[in-house]
Image (cartoon, coloured by chain):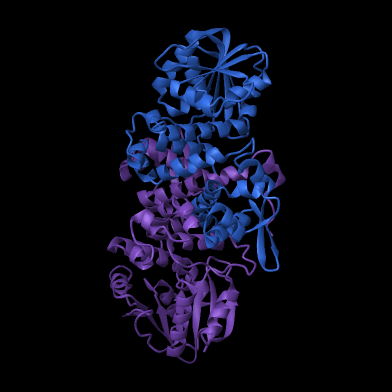
Chain colours: A purple, B blue
Amino acid sequence: MAEHLSQSELDYPFKLLEYFNGFRISKAIFSACELGVFDLLLQSQKPMSAVEVAQKLGTSEDGIERLLDVLVAIEIVDVEVVQGTAFYSSTDVANLYLAKTSPKSLHDLIIYNSQTIYPLWNNLVDAVREGKNQNEKTFGLPSEEIFSAIYRSEEEMLKFMGLMNSTWVIDGHDIVTAFDLTNFKTVIDLGGCSGALARELAKEYPSSTVTVLDLPAVVQTAQQHFAQQDDTICFQEGDFFEGEIPPADLYILARIIHDWKEEKNLKLLKKIHTACHPGGGVLIAEALLFENSRGPTMVQMFSLNMLVQTEGKEHPPSHYTHLLTEAGFRDVQVCRTGKSYDAILALK
Amino acid sequence: MAEHLSQSELDYPFKLLEYFNGFRISKAIFSACELGVFDLLLQSQKPMSAVEVAQKLGTSEDGIERLLDVLVAIEIVDVEVVQGTAFYSSTDVANLYLAKTSPKSLHDLIIYNSQTIYPLWNNLVDAVREGKNQNEKTFGLPSEEIFSAIYRSEEEMLKFMGLMNSTWVIDGHDIVTAFDLTNFKTVIDLGGCSGALARELAKEYPSSTVTVLDLPAVVQTAQQHFAQQDDTICFQEGDFFEGEIPPADLYILARIIHDWKEEKNLKLLKKIHTACHPGGGVLIAEALLFENSRGPTMVQMFSLNMLVQTEGKEHPPSHYTHLLTEAGFRDVQVCRTGKSYDAILALK
């Protein structure tokens, strides 16, 4: 059971007002990313005034000054006042996670949250009422075909792939090291998208062959936009729901199960079990709820997000154990990473 | 200068991810309000299951369960699990501030934030680029006439008045007691909207006569929707920019100055100075920035909000002192309340 908000909240609702302000904090950071504020400050050799930032980014001086001041208040941008003029500079955190060029950049995750998920959540009331996603109301797209909505244009596909890529850039290492995967020599990441998680695995287990299997359009976009020199992974076009699943020692399902209803997931896992080499396994990466469904907060938010955008939800470990066992897998092990995404390994 | 986010943020951006999630927290609370969750839980004599809540509110069971679990995680709703079924009940904080029937309800503030401000902030990038409000892009309304936008329909007027009313229900007492106003026998609240702040003043100073002067449509709506039995205040229809300002001992300008450009505000203050009885004064209620413009965070957010919605901004005390002095007032006193809104008093 959650502890209550402190009693002093009854005198004045400071914490509630902070919650009400949450959307403004999100949008302020998102908008600064979209405008290129963090890239400019990183590239600049010296702190910049609001006037200089406005000139470089083609914005109003007044608007960018207010935005910069908000970023200072939440400690993402630094400021020094010299003879009455404020000069802004970046912080280590912004350089590492918010600048587009950083290898750990969350830029693409931010763009997707800002431009796609924020408007979807404007219809949360209807999502709760109807118990279904809001792609139709928000974007005029049918709610049944969730990936037709998510991949509704080349631009949207690229944005979604960027979101996935961002996540595995910060969470991928924890996922692939949650268990010792050395013995799995052929690995297929089903729906592996841009390949970011697969690359983390290939880096950690250089003797394994790692393949991303995804829809043809996704594979083509991955190779065009997310390819790396001397890439350590392969791509294969396919549809793991409708088509063949090639044999392998290990299958990865990273943020796949949470998109779909139980029946569809069970069918998929049975299909994987059939294709899997004896002694092989499946590695699931998802954000895990507690068994009592009372947290973690972020995972419960993700689950509500799944309602707004997909037909799935987040689950506690027991649900995955049940599904995997039902599909024929054994020895289910669960590892909570303490980060956003957790790992589950099961063997054939 | 702000302290930086902690160094550990460089290992994993927990705080940044929390900021990115802010819009989801806001919308979860807002949506629960819109659906009537807090009213139902308050009225219920016993804790309710998600199935019961769904039936009463006409929502999906799955959707309301996910929403309730999020509210539990952020400590706004309480839960007890009996034989595998979760039973939800309200908390003191929710009963006091989120239920519609509470005298301290923030319900109307939430509705306005959810339905009007949240969509406006989806265009923050453009607001910063253009340096102007986004009424046109968001609602198809001309950006110049800010109150034509805000009062674009009877429903919108009522929502905006509800927002103002909510604020003064929680902040009004601090504003009217920031200074001893006993000697001001006739008080006019210019743009006093629903009359909530005026009522707080009348309650604290029962020997004073308090009048709200506002646009005819606003006064009519106030009398229709916000009137109280044995009301302690009077209403007068007028336009303090275009029309006459009646003589009085004290004028209140609560959240008026921050809507407009400096020139317009100065003209208004001069007009008030002319109408004011000798020895009278003006009481300004606004959220005050620090003099160095580096906080408070919430006020900087308000200032960015003013960019998105109006033609004004928030200011530090020195700006108001300058304006008031320029308009002929003297003895400017500033009181920071420590709540959302602060008070400034100046004498003629």
For image coordinates 60% across by 54% down, the residue present is B71
Residue B54 in sight from this viewpoint: yes
Residue furthest to the bottom: A278
The quadrant of the picture occupied by the N terminus of chain A is: bottom right
Horizontal and vertical percent position of residue A340: 53, 65
- Residue B275: x percent and y percent? 49, 9
Left or right of residue B79, residue A232 in this image: left
Q: Is residue B125 above or below residue B268?
A: below
The reply, left or right, for residue A340 in relation to residue B150 is: right
**Residue B205 placed where, x, y %?**
67, 18
The one of A155 and B221 positioned closer to us in this rendering: B221
Which residue occupies the foreground of this view, B174 or B336? B174
Identify the residue at image location x=47%, y=73%.
A257
- Compared to residue B105, the image places residue A104 above or below, namely below
Using the rendered view, name the quadrant where residue A52 is placed: top left
Residue A87 seen in render: no
In the rendered image, residue A138, in percent from the top left (x then y), is placed at 37, 54
Number of numbered markers: 0
Which residue is at the front of the view, A89 or B231? Answer: B231
- From the viewer's perspective, is B176 left or right of B294? right
Q: Residue at x 33, y 64 (%)?
A: A157
The outermost residue toward the top is: B278
